[in-house]
Image: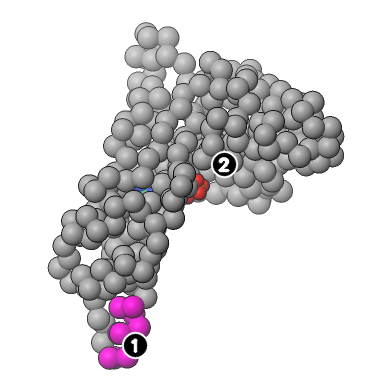
Amino acid sequence: VAEPALGTLGQAGVTLADVGGLASVKKRLDLSFLTPLRNPELSREFGKSLRGGLLLWGPPGCGKTFIARALAGELGASFYEIGLSDVLDMWIGSSERNLRSIFDTARRNRPCVLFFDEMDALGQKRSNLRGGGSAMRGVVNQMLSELDGASTENDGLFVLGASNHPWDIDSALLRPGRFDRTVLVLPPDVEGREAILRLHLRGRPTERLDLAKIARATDGMSGADLALVCEQATETAMEESMGSGRVVPITQRHLQEAAKSVRPSIGEW
Ligand code: ATP
């Protein structure tokens, strides 16, 4: 696929099995998208529609983008990721044109998961568009008309959004049929942390590890922080391997030291 002017488009490369923890979020995705798609007769029976978007919200680095990408992997769909603040252009009319071309690209690449990060950019609070509030209205209306598009046109198009501050999003976008289903993506609990550590160490040389212990020592860390812990431990093991001329596996100590040096990034969310 040709790289679109805005955002990135490509294959997902991951599935829900690559997402650690977040069992209730996965269940929700399953009920909203996967089960209805795999059971078209049952969906017809219940009048279950596949329309409308899903909004993932919560603190940074806890897997909103990752899980949207994994949904694309499950669906065998392409994954098209857009930062909404890049779409907004101060020139009247350009933001609407940008949005239209994004939806056109996504429709050409169906099945496609279209993922909008920074959904809160579509709200009055962040409006620094020329023309202020009324310019923002125009962009929100464009988004609504794309979402409400003729059913066949949007078949195979799955729209997901993410935000750290959903209360700033224009409320028209959250009404039924739009981003009406919201899913909170929280920092991982202790089992989630252990699963994330295991996933990020997969395929790397390690000694026998007590990951439950590392998980207990990393309370407050996001998935992104835990990925960094694994990265740092890996770098130390590689450095020691270079020094000793043999493969030194990642040890409990490498991980403990990395966990001490990484600061939880969620802070005052
Ligand atoms: P932001 O709000 O800053 O956009 P986000 O919630 O979208 O953050 P991601 O970009 O999905 O966070 O996560 C960053 C990285 O952290 C991922 O690419 C992945 O490596 C790791 N990660 C986060 N959560 C998980 C998880 N539950 N399982 C495995 N890896 C995770």
Q: Position of residue 236 (x, y in %)?
A: 33, 78
State yes or no: residue 16 in magenta: no
Question: Label 2's element?
Answer: strand
| Amino acid type indicated by mark 2 | Asp
Where 74 sits versus 148, above or below? below
Q: From this viewpoint, which residue is outermost toward the bottom?
A: 244
Q: Earlier in the sequence, mark 2 or mark 1?
A: 2
Indicate the position of residue 93 as horizontal and vertical percent values. Answer: 82, 33
Density class for disc 2 (Cα within 10 Å; few <14, some 14-19, many ≥20) is many
Above-or-below relation of 149 to 88: above
User: Visible in this render: residue 191?
Assistant: yes
Predominant SS along the magenta part: helix
Nearest the viewer among 149 and 116 is 116
**Side of 64 where 23 appears, left or right:** left
CB within 8 Å, label 2 to label 1: no
Point 41% across, 33% down: residue? 184
Outermost residue, front side = 268
Can residue 66 be seen from the camera position used here?
no
Q: Which mark is residue 242?
A: 1
Q: Which mark is residue 117?
A: 2
Q: Residue at x 60, y 36 (%)?
A: 120
Q: Is residue 240 magenta?
A: yes
Q: CA distance from mark 2 to mark 1?
A: 40 Å
What stretch of residues is rendered in magenta?
Answer: 236-245
Q: Report the front residue among 160 and 4.
A: 160
Q: On the rendered structure, is 48 left or right of 88?
A: left
In terms of depth relative to the viewer, which is nearer, 241 or 106? 241
Q: Is residue 17 above or below residue 203?
A: above
